[in-house]
Amino acid sequence: MSTPQTEPRTSPTRSAPLAGRRVRAAVIGTGAIGRGSHLPALAKLAEEGEVEVVAAVDVNAAAAEEFCRAGGVPHAYTDLGQMLAEQRPDLVTICTPPTLHKAQTIAALRAGAWVWCEKPPVPTLADYAAVEAEEGVEGGPYASIVFQHRFGSGTRHARRLLDGGALGRPLVAHCQTTWHRDTAYYAVPWRGRWDTEGGGPAMGHGIHQMDLMLDLLGPWSEVRAMAGRLVHDVETEDVSTALVRFENGALATVVNSVLSPDEVSRIRVDCERATVELTHLYGHSNADWRITPAPDVPAADAAAWRDFGPDVPSSHVEQLRELIVSMRKGERPRSSGADGRTSLELIAALYKSAFTDATVRAGEIGPGDPFFTSMHGDAPGWAPAAAQEVTA
């Protein structure tokens, strides 16, 4: 994908105010996630009069043109800089491999466009800091991450119960992403490599459930982890486990795997008065949530907790809808800035703990720490061979 070269920060060239008009959006990367999730979400918001998709960009000209033909998008490009200059979109959605996210996000922000980027947003915390430095100070543009599991009626109701204290203190939690990926999956050149994917299942798969766990339980304080390569011939891990302590005192287990034939995604929070559990795979609705009250809870309380209201499934549509509202208000959206960084910080801590056999505390990974600039932290046995030679 062609992107402008990194240059000194300048004030973004902003499009006209959004009041009274549709948000002009462009899709970067026309592969499976762009076709299957981003374009349908944008099309839904277009039906509601909120969005118009003005362009798509892909390094493969034929792919970009086919994407535009199929989706009714007027302009196909192979050059991101040219598209930004000519179309001046208000919003750019990024659906490319992780190694491209930083440069493409920064290019869009400098052009005055808000960004909605697939996970992981960037491969390292240092890259995330570089993106944050390019955001607008007040009113945007801002860069947000696709964390669609936070959105929808089920998550909203569970978070309200937990935040309001109706269920009592959170005590024990479990966060599980146990999926299955075969050898063919890792035949894609950028997968399983630190420099192009940023990490293994903790970074590329479990990040969604870990982000949802953090959204429900709040800040963590320390983590103790293990990781392994048990099946796949990759640089990264193919399984990891962690114990996480939260600031509110809750203790959680986290499992991320691509070795599990019986695939499931699960969040469970045991509180003083009830257990809240979500069991799904790639998305959830109200029916995927279960609340089990403690024996002494009045039936009326339990009935109220189990009323999730009208069913609004988690989806790209729901997150995009909220993002558009934030854009129109000129407010920082959820899953951006410090809020978006929380998941990346937990994953960096998980890797550091697993690779150094030490407990890692919140806030300790910053500039000067090797895990700030690479998720493998140049750790022996985990860093790519070239990195290990440099540090030897």
Image (cartoon, rainbow, N blue to C red):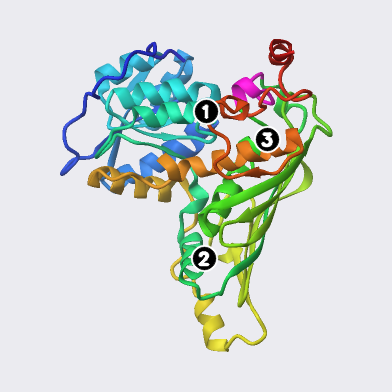
> Hey, what amino acid is under mark 2?
Ala
Give the label on residue 156, or none.
Answer: none
Residue drawn at point x = 69 percent, y = 11 percent:
390
Position of residue 109 measured from the top left corner of the image (x, y, whole percent):
33, 27
Q: Earlier in the sequence, mark 3 or mark 2?
A: 2
- Residue 352 is left or right of residue 66, and the answer is right
> Hey, what amino acid is under mark 1?
Pro
Position of residue 159 measured from the top left corner of the image (x, y, whole percent):
49, 63
Quick check: marks 1 and 3 in contact, CB under 8 Å? Answer: no
Residue underneath mark 1: 367
Between 378 and 288, the one nearer to me in the picture: 378
Compute the Cα span from label 1 to label 3.
Answer: 14 Å
Between 19 and 373, the one nearer to me in the picture: 373
Residue underneath mark 3: 352
Compute the Cα span from label 3 to label 2.
Answer: 31 Å
Residue drawn at point x = 46 percent, y = 67 percent:
160
Dot 3: few (<14), some (14–19), or many (≥20) neighbours within 10 Å?
many
Give the label on residue 158, or none.
Answer: 2
Segment colored magenta: 189-197
Dot 2: few (<14), some (14–19), or many (≥20) neighbours within 10 Å?
many
Q: Earlier in the sequence, mark 1 or mark 3?
A: 3
Residue drawn at point x = 37 percent, y = 40 percent:
42
Decide whether residue 191 is among the magenta residues: yes
Image quarter (top left, top right, bottom left or bottom right) of the C terminus:
top right
- Residue 331 is left or right of residue 179, and the answer is left
Position of residue 113 measured from the top left corner of the image (x, y, whole percent):
30, 29
